[in-house]
Image (tube, grey):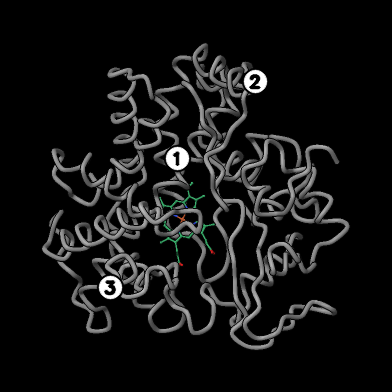
Amino acid sequence: MKHDPHDPVQAATAVDPYPYYARLRTERPWYFDERLSSWVAASADLVERALQHPDLLVRPPGQPVPPALQGTAAGAVFGRLARMNEGVPHAAARRALRTVLAAWQPAEARRLAAEQASAVWAARSADDAQALYRVPLLVMAQLLGVPDGDCPRVARQVEAFVACLSPLSGTAQLEAAQAAAAELSGCFDRGLGDWAPPQDPGLAREVFAANLVGLLSQTCDATAGLIGNTALALGRDATLCAEVQAGRQPLDGVVAEVARHDPSIQNTRRYAGRAVRLGAGVEMAAGEAVLVLLAAANRDPALHAQPERFDARRRQVGHDGFGSGRHRCPGSDLAAAMTCGAMAVLVQQPDRLCSAAAGFGKRPVYRPSVNARIPLLTL
Ligand code: HEM
């Protein structure tokens, strides 16, 4: 087809990747992509099997840290993140996250996000979308107890740090990421934001500090994308926007449906630690990679009734945009709460949302990424 992406990685930032995903699901739910040198899983069933399989790992065997980051401050943080670990180290890092996340109420995150979004709105700069995308990061810094005056600096450093998580980053970005990683982990290690490491003999102090940085970096792009894609969904549908504004349609339902229907994280990767068999004819040799198409699973009719339809009252069942299995996102409630808080401010200006969506329709561009879907909106 004329507008088909070249491959499933490019699909993440394509204008409308969903017909392409639908064809993969029906025609090639499991295949080897020569361009990507990777297997691709596109049906909800295979996506689920891949995410649940104990021998499909988040990093290539023997390479806990990407070569470009080895021996650097960013590499040290990277190697300690729950997201990048398996087995015993994963359990320790996940405990660190549970400790922190258990202390926060989604309602508080929602309130703080509304406050931050109002401040951005009141300031009205030339680059409002960028500022809005920073709202979740500022909220997360506040929740971590970073003093208000330091939050913007921490947010800028996290934005620099996340460059090291993307294979699209160049040398200059990687260098900036090193400096940011050193400063951020140093700050948290010295007790920035009054987080004493928990009394847990299995949890090293530096693992705890790295995962505090991880909470901020995981928040960054994914939640920015959810805010942007929700702004688009509401800007494109004046009736829905009016219903939300009048309080007849709760924002929670809209945000949950955007997370499924047009998710900000479109895919993830796994690597076979040993030979793996996911089903008849679905096999991987040790060391091989698989690109797991979360966004294709989200619209699989085997799981969701009329999956292409946007239905803010839908009861969400599985594959909701936040992954599955042992690495499923522990921040999903928080992310939804922050997005609702920010959107509660935006829906008060439906005309602005509508013209942002119309402008995006004329020039639909997403921020370059191999897995995140963040629209470049002019709000
Ligand atoms: C809309 C926003 C978000 C989306 C769409 C999202 C999505 C995801 C997905 C799909 C995964 C699984 C990755 C994989 O299996 O390879 C994940 C993991 C993770 N997310 Fe999120 N996330 C969001 C926001 C957040 C926030 C706000 C936090 C922090 C509070 C967070 C923390 C994490 C962590 C720590 C992991 C790794 C967990 C582990 O490996 O055990 N995420 N996220």
What residue occupies the far front of the structure in this picture?
A: 171
Residue behind mark 2: 362
Q: Is residue 58 above or below residue 292?
A: below
Q: Nearer the viewer, residue 165 or 169?
A: 169
Residue in the picture at 68% in, 36% down: 15
What residue occupies the far right of the structure in this picture?
A: 27
Q: In 3D space, how far apart are the residues under numbered discs 3 and 2 (Cα atoms)?
A: 46 Å
Q: Quadrant of residue 102?
A: bottom left
Q: Is residue 335 above or below residue 38?
A: above
Residue in the picture at 80% in, 49% down: 22
Q: Is residue 184 above or below residue 289?
A: above
Label located before the other in sequence (1 or 3): 3
Which numbered disc, 1 or 2, marks the residue closer to the eye?
Answer: 2
Q: Quadrant of residue 340?
A: top left
Residue behind mark 1: 224
Q: Amino acid at mark 1?
A: Ala
Q: In 3D space, how far apart are the residues under numbered discs 1 and 2 (Cα atoms)?
A: 21 Å
Residue behind mark 3: 207
Label located before the other in sequence (3 or 2): 3
Quarter of the image with the N terminus in it? top right
Label 3: state its secondary structure.
Answer: helix
Residue in the picture at 51% in, 16% down: 246
Determine which of the numbered discs, if any, sits on residue 10 in the image: none
Q: Is residue 279 above or below residue 265?
A: below
What residue occupies the far top of the structure in this picture?
A: 351
Q: Amino acid at mark 3?
A: Val
Label located before the other in sequence (1 or 2): 1
- Relative image position of residue 118 (x, y in whole percent): 31, 23
In this rendering, would 367 be left or right of 289? left
Q: Amino acid at mark 2?
A: Lys
Q: Nearer the viewer, residue 190 or 317?
A: 190
**Is label 1 within 8 A of ligand 1 (CB to nearest ligand atom)?**
no
